[in-house]
Amino acid sequence: MSKSDSIMVNCHAGGRAANTTFMLTELLGYENVKNYDGFWTEWSRFEALPFEKDSITIIN
């Protein structure tokens, strides 16, 4: 991977991904980093979309 490759970071609602975006761009010099700020929040609204449940995931 080169520092000019496109990178998309995501997490639940973008908070942790914002930290990763900052570190990649400002501290490590990656040029094309995007933060998808609604990833899990958007995905989880649609019951038909797949996801894996791990041992700590709680689904009501």
Image (tube, grey):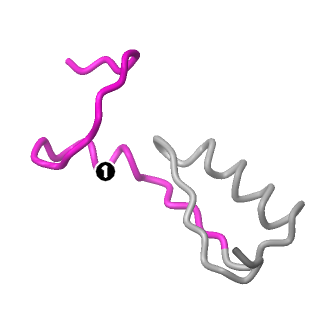
Residue 35: % across, % down: 57, 61
Q: Residue furthest left?
A: 48
Vertical position of residue 51 compared to residue 27: above or below? above
**Residue at image point 36% right, 24% down:** 54
> Which residue occupies 78% across, 72% down?
30
Q: Quadrant of the C terminus?
A: top left
Give the amino acid type for the residue marked by disc 1 in the picture: Glu
Q: What x and y, as percent, mark residue 34?
A: 60, 69
What kind of element bears circle 1? helix
The magenta stretch is 33-60
Q: Is residue 31 above or below residue 38?
A: below
Using the image as rendered, state which of residue 42 and residue 31 is in the foreground.
Answer: 31
Relative to 16, say whether 57 is above or below: above
Near mark 1 (Cα within 10 A), the count class, few <14, some 14-19 or many ≥20, is few
Residue 11 horizontal side relative to residue 46, left or right? right
Q: Which residue is mark 1?
A: 42
- Residue located 37% across and 16% down the image: 55
**Magenta: predominant secondary structure element?**
loop
Number of numbered discs visible in the structure rendering: 1
Hey, which residue is sitting farthest right in the picture? 27
Residue 12 rendering spot, x and y as whole percentages:
46, 41
